[in-house]
Amino acid sequence: MCYGRNAQATLSWHKVLLPLILLWATKAVVVVNALALKGCDDQCGNVNIPYPFGTREGCYMNETFLITCNRTYNPPLAFMGEGNINVTEIWLSGELRIYAYVAEDCYSQTGRNTYYDSGLTLHNFPISNTRNKFTAIGCDTNALISGSSGINYTTGCISLCADKKDVVEGSCSGIGCCQTAIPKGVVDFNISVLSYNNHTTVWDFNPCSYAFVVEEGGYNFSVRDLRDFRNRTIETPMVLNWAIGDQNCSEAKKDLQNYACTSKDNRTVCLDSNNGKGYYCSCSKGFEGNPYLPDGCQDIDECQNATLSLCAQKCTNYNGTYECSCEPGYEGDAKSDGTGCRRKPSTLIVRVALGEKH
């Protein structure tokens, strides 16, 4: 194939422009989607690691937010601090998901007991009281959860049933499965699972009791769980809260040098933790991203997303907001949930021709 001089010149320009365009696009994506500090890993396996969390010194705000990325697993797994608590998701809204062990209380047919309890100490990360439930499985089961750090508490639930036929699939109402709420401010817990009759009256279909804290919606009870829950489930998902320091917003703003909501141009808001001490940051309305980074909160172009804009016709994006307007010849508030845009009434023009009869 032969090219003329103009075609060759065009191709040469493409060779120059294309890398520049790709470089600009790459930089734009990095700015908008930046999660971590510059030069720091923002991912461990399938888990995003947003600042204030980080996987090495210089990448996290303080040691509270250290995430250990164990690359001996495939894919790599993220763990809290230097411990063995597996982190599977971190949200900038002040929450993270971990996996915790299940407590069990099992018996042989003669009533001999094999027992495994479960406990967890989290120090700086209270268990979310709105996102989790304490759950127990069994037909001869008294399950308790207690703790002394943060707040002193003991709560629990009882699950009883005499016949497998009485158990309702998917129901945790106290027959084969029970649930109760977690109090606020819990940073540690110990689970105890007790039996009234060593499961002797229900052993043929329920030799064990189980208890655990689980993310709401993270567990759906099955009658099958009465016999072999442990064989299929070792850990369950749990949501924790996290926050910055132990001051509320008004106190933290007095020390701007250490104040964490650093995104520039007032693009961040400070929110007090609703589960323990501290505060967390959020991008202001109309912005998205990581509010803990100086350039972390970027403008949302609502006009590019029909679910975000409410414009009936024209949409104009501005920094942090947008504006609706009508096309020429139309009027109204221009909003799809308002009066919208309707055609203006035509101006009556009467043309009278000389000599025309009326």
Image (tube, rainbow, N blue to C red):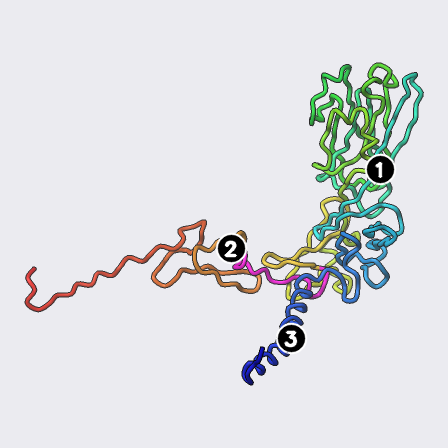
Q: CA distance from mark 2 to mark 1?
A: 44 Å
Of residues 238 and 153, the one drawn nearer to the viewer in this rendering: 238
For the view shown, which residue lies furthest in the bottom direction?
A: 5
Q: Is residue 318 above or below residue 87?
A: below
Q: Residue at x 59, y 78 (%)?
A: 11
Sort mark 1 into few (<14), some (14-19) or many (20+) by Cα contacts within 10 Å: many
In the image: residue 73, left or right of residue 38: right
Q: Secondary structure at mark 1?
A: strand
Distance, label 1 to label 3, CA atoms, is 51 Å
Q: Earlier in the sequence, mark 1 or mark 3?
A: 3
Q: Earlier in the sequence, mark 3 or mark 2?
A: 3
Number of residues whose C-alpha sits closer than 10 Å to that of mark 2, classed few (under 14), some (14–19) or many (20 or more):
many
Disc 3 target residue = 20
Identify the secondary structure beneath mark 2: loop
Q: Which residue is mark 1?
A: 101
The answer to which quarter of the image holds residue 218 is: top right
Quadrant hosting residue 120: top right
Q: Residue 193: x and y, percent? A: 85, 27
Residue flagged by tag 3: what amino acid is it?
Answer: Leu
Which portion, as a residue range, is magenta? 292-306
Label 3's element?
A: helix
Q: 19 or 200: which is nearer to us?
A: 19
Residue at the image point whose x is 5% and y is 67% from the top: 355
In contact (CB < 8 Å): disc 2 and disc 1: no
Instruction: Where is residue 136? Give x, y as percent.
Output: 79, 28
Mark 1 or 3: the one toward you: 3
Which quarter of the rendering shows the C terminus? Answer: bottom left
Residue tagged by mark 2?
309
